[in-house]
Structures are given as structure tokens and as C-alpha cells.
Amino acid sequence: MAPTDEPRAPESAAPARPIAEMQARLAALVEEAVAQALAEGDLPPLEERPEFRVEIPNDRSHGDFATNAALALARPARQNPRAIAQAIVRWLKVEPPIAEVSVAGPGFINFRLVPSWLNPVVTAARRPDWGSSAVGGGRRILVEFVSANPTGPLNLVNARSAAYGDALCRVLAAAGYHVEREYYVNDAGNQFQRFADAVRVRYMQAVEGRADVELPEGAYPGEYIIGYVQAAVEALGGRGAVAALPEEERVERLARWAVERIIAEAQDVLARYRVRFDRWMRESELRERGVADAVFRRLVASGHTYVQDGAVWLRTTAFGDDKDRVLRRADGTYTYIVPDIAYHADKLERCDIALDILGQDHHGYVPRLRAALAALGYDTSRLEVLINQMVHLVRGGERVRMSKRRGEFVTMEEFLGEVDIDAARWFFAARALDSTMEFDLDLANLRTNENPVYYVQYAHARIASLLERAAEAGAWPVEAGAGGAEAAPYGYEEPAERALLWEIARFPEEVAQAAELRAPHRLAVYARELAAAYHTFYTDCRVLGAEPPVQAARLLLSDATRHTLARCLDLLGVSAPERM
RNA sequence: GCGCCCGUAGCUCAGGCGGACAGAGCAGCUGCCUUCUAAGCAGCGGGCCGCAGGUUCGAAUCCUGCCGGGCGCGCCA
């Protein structure tokens, strides 16, 4: 890649992914230098060409970029990595914007670039699609999350799954995936029957006043069902009308009403939480469409089933499960796994990647699901599963006791009554999913610097306020050519400016990484770092009242930061306030 | 017993597909508001990365075995 005199296209002047593009460029130069060194006998012949990377040093005092190429080549070249590094550097074309190349440490090659190389980032970062990329390649990814059984209100773990899943979806979309969000509603089968059993008993207790009946073993224990039963009685025409119904019909109708009510409440609370789904897929619908029957027949046809004790089993052990699983009981009913397999098979027909976020209490179920999908001939690598770990709620410095067994838990509704939605979403989206977390209500409610949410939001509000003041003074928006990157009369050479520019430039890479690793919580770390860089800049560099070109350039830089913060917070599902 | 997840600073957590001295916030201590939001900034102190082996030029990161915590191991879902 020889230097050319070609004029740069406007696109390259404001790259969509400045850091990745520079890394690729440096990697190509290193590749070229290695080839030259080999050709000239400056490096011993290699049996293999190992991969190397151009990365960002942990310690930026080493340079802007570094490559481990010499370390990677040490083994195949059977030579000291430092000597290899020297050889590579001898053949390296040091061209702008490379200012300096050095060999350091065990054999890293460090690159320092001229400060101005990042100036175009200001322009790039103010474009609407800043941070977006095409790393997802338009792959269709179907994300299923929350999917709580409609036998009770959503709880705290559901709130975590909702916040994290929603952030993940936003991040995936920004990274160029085609995203669909689904909520699977398990509104049929045994699950529903057991709920109905509880409804039957609660009706007798609460409406008929029977003190002698108790919940059967295995029925849903929660007291909350009483409330649904009472509401259902009202909705179905009152006590008299309901009492007149034959018992089976009465129980069925009360339970059905309660389930629909629970689903509606889940939809409401999630909407309030700013989490939306593209589809609420019901198990009952899948059954009606005959999807479960069809998949059962496909499994039988696959030859991986057998009959034992009158039940039909799937030989999941042939696909890595630790025991075989019953598909159809001797009484002809399906076990829960059949509609679930059917649902996942259906999803795999509709997407490239099916991603499930499951509670940790369901993780043991993944191997049998994969096994079944493998038996159906699907490439199970297309099913990705993220495990959502538990949440311990801390109030007043103590853990709030919850017992699923006794039906005692904090509902999402109650939770949102106690905490700001931005704080809740931030806390959940900022923690890795697969690790048990503590949610400190008191901390989340603090409107002080102890609360990390406000730190980031404050940076955004601060900039908004600054721009407002600038607008009042007629300095904003900046007129074309008045300063900043385009005209470059001012080059952002203050350390705080350069540090800030660098943080902004990282954003597209952070989004891409968060998407590829299915780890949106990385963006919370990033948001904090970006906000910190701005606060430092704000303290060190006066904006309003600076020399006109400097003021203009700093306003543009501030706006680039504001936009990046807003984009980042949006990906996390947290609002970016204009004032605080 | 078997399987999955977790164990990093006083607290809450990043980092974990091997790389240059292990990070952040909070809490503690010291400074900084006559000027754009101090919900801010600058600095200090604080860690056997659960323990022990192994692989590697190099391990918080990979492998094995322990220890501790969570969850699962149904013809419940």
C-alpha cells in the first residue's frame, strides 16, 4: 500500500470506524514489512505465518497502537522477538500519520501517530449513525428473553433479563444485525393446569369462604393468586354469575382470565420499563397450529426415538445429553419439551441465530434442547444461550429475603415503584449477566455522586447546557469553516482534548465488541470512561470565551461527545437528559 | 455424586478467545468553585486476581485437582 497523491474522499476523512480502520492500515504495513524482510533474508524463512494483531496498549504512554507481530513470529522464526521486531521496523514504511515507531518490552512494535489523525472523528461522531457498523453482516438474530410463565407477576430477575436483553438487542441492531425480539408465553399444557388448580382452591377459600381446603402439593403457592381470582370473579359478572357455572368451566374461565390479566400486566410493566417485543409467541398458538405435533412426528421420523413403559423417548444421549428424555407420556400428552423444541425449531427457521436468555434455574435444560434440535438436523451452533443469574435485592444494607417456594418475591411492579427506571436499567445493563449480582436500592436511589448513573447523565446534561449557552451567545451552531476538524485551524493538542477525542473514537469498536461478545454491559464501562474524559476536558479547557477558532473547535468536540454519550446511553436503554 | 455459573482492593464490579507494572466506581485521606452545571476535577493510600500444580518466552486469562458460594440433575416447566 504505497502512499499516493490521490485526494482523500470525504468518507475517509471522517471514518465510520476510525480505530479499526487505522488498525487495519497499520496491520497491512506490518504485513508488508514482514514480507519484505523475508524476501531480503532479514528474517529466517517461516514454516507458518502466525496471526498477529494491532492493538491498543494498556499503557498509552507506549504509543497509540502496538503490534505483537514480532512476538507471534518468534516461534516459527526461532529467533528472539526483539531482533525480529528490529527487522520488521527496518522494512516498515513510516508514512503519515505515523510519527514514530519503536520497539519496546519483550518485542512489541509501538506506533505513535501525529495528534491530528483523530481530528476527523469530531465530524464522524456528530453523524446520526455514529457507532453503527456492519459487523453483524445483516444476520438475522432472534432474541428471546424474559419469557416468564404467565402464572404470576414479573419479578426482579425478569427485570434484569429485560434490561439486559433489551440493551443487547439495541447493541446488536447498531452492529448491523437484523434483530427480532420475542417473548415466549407458556400459556398451555400442564403449566396452565397447575395454575388452574391453585385458582380452584383459592376460589373456594376466598370466595366461597371454605377454610377446610388447602392447596394441593405442587400447586402455585403465592397469595397473589387470590387477588387475581377476586378480580376475575368481578370481570366475569360477579359472584352470583360465577357461582352458577359448572365447576370445571368456572375454574377454566377464572384461570384463563387470570392468565390473560397477568400477560397484560407484564406487557404494561415492560412497556413502562421501555422494553418492547416484536412478538409475543404463545405456546397455545403453536399447539393450535399443530407445530408441536409436527415436530413430534419429525423426531419420530428421525429414528432417534424409542418406546419404553408406554412413553415415547428421545435418545438425547446420542447428542451429548446425560439422559434420554420423554417426549410423550403413556397417556398421550406431550412433556413440556415438545412444544419447546417446536418453538426453537420454528425460530431456527426464521433466523440465522436464535439467542435465548434463560434463568439459571433452566440452564440444565439446554443440553436436551440442543440434542433435540440436533436430532432434527439443525446446526445447534445457531442456538446461543445466555444465562441470567440471580439478583439479591439490598434494602437498608440488608438482603431482602425472597422465597420462590413460598411464593414470596419482589415483583417488578413493586421494584419500579421504589427505584428510578434509568437507575434500574443502568444497574442491570451494567453488570455481566452470568454473575450473581446485588441490587442496592438505596444506592440506586441516591441522587448523588455515589450513583454512577448520574455521573454519565450529568456529563450529557452539562454539555447540553453548554451548547445552550453558546447558542444564546450566537456561537452555536458553528458555521461551516469556522473551526474544528474541517478547517483544522485548531488541532486539539491539549492532553485533555486528545484524550477525549480518543475516547470518542473508540465508540464504534466498543459497540461492535459488545455485540460480538453479546456483552452490552461493556458499554456501561465505556460510557463512564467517556464521561470522565469529558469532565476532565471541561475542567482543563475553557470553551466559552476562548479564541473564536478554539471555541468553535471545542464546541464541536463537546457536541461530538454529547452525541456519543446519547447514543451510548440509548443503547443501554437509559435516558440522556438535557438538564439535571 | 454428576453438570453449568461464580470467587479480582474494605464494598459493588470491570478485565478473562494469553502479552508490557492488575483496573474503575464507592468508601477513607489531601487539595480545587469571583468565569461554561462541584451530580465535577486533581492527587494519595489500598489487591497472595480463592488455593495448589501444569502448559508457555509470558497466565487474573488456558488445562487439571482441590476449597467456598449459587443453580440444576422429573413422564414439573
Image (tube, rainbow, N blue to C red):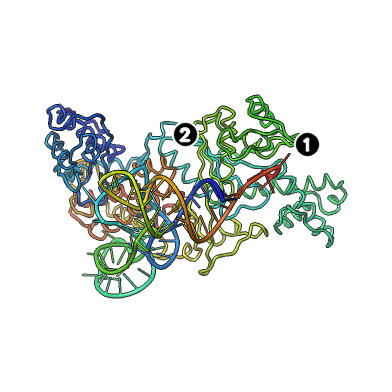
Cβ–Cβ under 8 Å for marks 1 and 2: no
Upstream in sequence: badge 1 or badge 2: 2
Which residue is denoted by mark 2 in the rendering? A178
Q: Is residue A486 visible?
A: yes
Q: Name which residue type carries label 2.
A: His
- Whether A313 is drawn above or below A104: the answer is above
Q: Are marks 1 and 2 on the same chain?
A: yes
Question: So how many labels did they put on this image?
Answer: 2
Q: Name which residue type carries label 1.
A: Asp
Which of the 4 image quadrants contains residue A100?
A: top left
Gap in angstroms between the C-alphas marked 1 and 2: 42 Å
Which residue is denoted by mark 1 in the rendering? A331
Quadrant position of the C terminus of chain A in the picture: bottom left
Determine whether the residue tagged by mark 1 lies in a helix, strand or loop. Answer: loop
Residue pictured at 39% horizontal, 57% vertical: A579
Q: Position of residue A490 (x, y in %)?
A: 17, 47
Tell me the number on the disc at residue A134.
Answer: none
Residue B53 horizontal side relative to residue A139, left or right? left
Which of the 4 image quadrants contains residue B8?
A: bottom left
Q: Position of residue A142 (x, y in %)?
A: 52, 36
Quadrant position of the N terminus of chain A in the picture: top left
Which of the 4 image quadrants contains residue A306?
A: top right
